[in-house]
Amino acid sequence: MTTTMKRRQIVKNIALGAGTTTVLAACDRTSNSPSVQTNQSPNVRWRMVTSWPKSLDTIFGGAQTVCDRVKEMTGGRFNIEPYAAGEIVPGLEVLDAVQNGTVQCGHTASYYYVGKNPALAFGTSVPFGLTAQQQNAWYYHGGGLETMHELYADFNIISFPAGNSGAQMGGWFKREVKSKSDLNGLKMRIPGLGGKVMASLGVNVQVLPGGEIFLALDRGAIDAAEWVGPYDDKKLGLNKAASFYYYPGWWEPGSSFEIQINKSEWEKLPKEYQEIFKTAAMEANLNMLSKYDALNGKSLQELIAGGTKLIPYSPDILQAAQQAAFANYEENASKDATFKEVYEQWNKFRQKVSQLPLYYISSDLLVSR
C-alpha cells in the first residue's frame, strides 16, 4: 500500500470513528430520555383555590400535598399555588371558579354542589354509605372515578380524589337532642344529602364553609354544626361554642375530598404532567386519611378532658335518618335520570362490597341496614 493510500485509509477510519461516536452519543441520550424530556418540558404555573382555611392543616394539607409533590416530581417546572377559602373566591364557589376558568383547579368537596346536581354527593359521601376504604375501592376499582368524570363533563371539569377524613363525628349541639322530636326547628350547619335527610327530620339546615362555623355557632345564628372530627373541630374551637358532641356521623362514614380541574386546561398539559398530577392526588388522598386517624384519638381525649360531653344519637334518630336517607335516594332516582344512573351503579357496588348487612357499631348501639 502506497503512502498516499495509507493516509486515505487513516482519514477514513477517523471519519468512521467520529460517526460511531455520534451514533453512540445519540443512543446514550435516548437511553436517558427522562432527563432530556424534563429539560424540554414546559414551565406551567397554575392557581388552586380551596374550600378550607389554612389553619386546618390536615384538610388544607391535602391541597398542599398535591402542589408540593407536583413541583417536586417535575423538577420545579409545574408549579401550583394553593389559596385558602376567601383569598380568591369564597369556599363554596370553588366549582364555579374552576368551571369558568378563573383558576385552573380547586380542592373541595363535591357534595357542596348538590344544588347543581344531587348526584355529586356520591363523590364525597352519603348517609349510611361507604366507609373510607370502601369509598376508595369504589373510586379506584369500582367505576367511581369514571362515574364522576361523566358527571363533571357537563361542567368542563375532571376530578380526582385527593383526601379523605374517614368516619366523621355527629356534630356539636348547644343543647341535648334526646329523641327525634328534639330536632324539630333546630338550626344546624350540615351540607350534602345529610342535610337533606336532616331537613326531612325537621331541622332548619344551613350550609356554611368551615371558616364561618364557629362564629355562627358561638353567636347563636345556628344551634348545631358538624364539621369533620375531633382534630379539626378542636382547631376551629367548636367545643368553645357548644358542649354536646354527638356520634356517629352517619351522614359521612368516609368522606372524600377532591381536586377539580378545568378540563380545557387539563388537556393542555403534557401526558407526563397529567400522570404526575394523578399520582400526587392519590398520595394526598391516602396521606390525609392516615393523618386524621393518627390525630383524632388524642384530640378526642383532650376534648373530653376539657368538659365536652360525648353522647350517642338515640336509636329513634338513627332509625328515622336511615329510613329517610334511602327514601331520599329512591325519590331522587325517580325524578332524575342522572341521579338514578349514578345511584344504581354506586348501590350495586355497595351491596357487593358489603356482602352481608353492613353494621354501624356505636358503643352499645347497633344499627343495620
Image (tube, grey):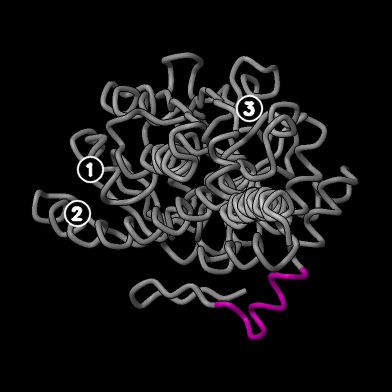
Which residue is label 1 attached to?
234
Element on which disc 3 rests: helix
What is the CA distance from the residue labelled 1 to the residue labelled 2? 7 Å
- Residue at 61% across / 41% down in the picture? 273
Whether residue 122 is visible to the viewer of this picture, yes or no, is: no
- Residue at 71% across / 49% down in the picture? 4
Q: Is residue 358 above or below residue 130?
A: below
| Residue 356 is covered by the magenta coloring | yes
Q: In the rendered structure, find residue 322 and report the number of the disc placed on it.
A: none
Amino acid identity at mark 2? Ser
Q: Is residue 7 left or right of residue 174?
A: right
What is the CA distance from the residue labelled 3 to the residue labelled 1? 28 Å
| Front one among 100 and 319 | 100
Q: Residues within 10 Å of mark 1 (few under 14, many from 20)?
A: some
Q: In the rendered structure, find residue 95 and report the number of the disc placed on it.
A: 3
Give the label, 3 or 2, closer to the camera.
Answer: 3
| Front one among 154 and 261 | 261
Q: Is residue 292 left or right of residue 190?
A: left
Q: Position of residue 119 (x, y in %)?
A: 74, 45
| Front one among 335 and 72 | 72
| Residue 38 is covered by the magenta coloring | no
Q: Main secondary structure of the magenta part?
A: helix
CB atoms of marks 1 and 2 within 8 Å: yes
N-term-proximal mark, 3 vs 2: 3
Amino acid identity at mark 1? Lys
What is the CA distance from the residue labelled 3 to the residue labelled 2? 32 Å
Q: Which residues are magenta?
A: 348-358
Q: In the rendered structure, find residue 299 and report the number of the disc placed on it.
A: 2
Give the label, 3 or 1, closer to the camera.
Answer: 3
N-term-proximal mark, 3 vs 1: 3
| Front one among 344 and 135 | 135
